[in-house]
Image (cartoon, rainbow, N blue to C red):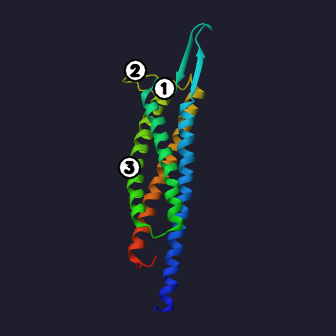
Amino acid sequence: MKPEGTVDQESKELGLMRGVSIIELVLRVVAILGTLASAVAMGTTDQTLPFSTQTVLFQAQYDDISTFRFFVITNAVVCGYLAISLPMAVYHVIRTGAAKSRALLIFLDATMLSVLTAGASAAAAIVYLAHKGNASANWLAICQQYEKFCERITGSLIGSFGSVLIFVLLIPLSGLVLTRQQLLPRVI
């Protein structure tokens, strides 16, 4: 029979791990919304401007630049991954002692963090060029003409980098629960 203090300590640890698992679940839902909003905002971005006459039109679309296509694809892939990982996150709330599935999620989260960071960073570089241009490469800033286009592509970066931040929080949180599980006896 265990001393009463030990049982109380174990129940506190289980409560802490369940609370962290609930926070992870909420963060995953927020990250889904961020990546989905970023993909939709970028994927539906276009603006048409008339030149000196109405017959000549200049159009800016996200798919004119392959980096923006990569951005939309990476956000969609990460959003899909997050949606698929939701049942496992719910499982972790119910069974706080599930160590192998949590370790798998840490690995997959780290992979998706890398993919999402690559897409967001590449798009951020192009957005910077759209706003500032590059005089030595003779690239002009286009945001003075295509204001709505630039506002939307800049806004889409916010959701993506917000999701990157969420992954940066998710990985250590999962690692914390995993190490706490190793410290507890195998009664869980």
Query: Is residue 109 left or right of 58 when viewed as pictured?
Result: left
Whole-angstrom CA distance, mark 1 to mark 3, is 25 Å
Disc 1 + disc 3, Cβ < 8 Å: no
> Residue 69, image x and y in percent?
46, 31
Q: Which residue is mark 3?
A: 111
The residue depicted at 53 percent of the width and 69 percent of the height is 18
Could you say which disc has been placed on residue 63 in the image?
Answer: 1
Q: How many marks?
A: 3
Query: Is residue 88 left or right of 54 when viewed as pictured?
Result: left
Rate crowding at label 1 as few (under 14), some (14 to 19) or many (20 or more) other CA atoms within 10 Å.
some
Q: Is 138 or 79 nearer to us in this picture?
A: 79
Q: Is 104 or 155 nearer to us in this picture?
A: 104
Circle 1: residue type: Asp
Circle 3: residue type: Thr
Rate crowding at label 2 as few (under 14), some (14 to 19) or many (20 or more) other CA atoms within 10 Å.
few
Above or below 95: residue 166: above
Whole-angstrom CA distance, mark 2 to mark 1, is 22 Å
Secondary structure beneath label 2: loop
Circle 2: residue type: Asn
Between circles 2 and 3, the one closer to the viewer is: 3
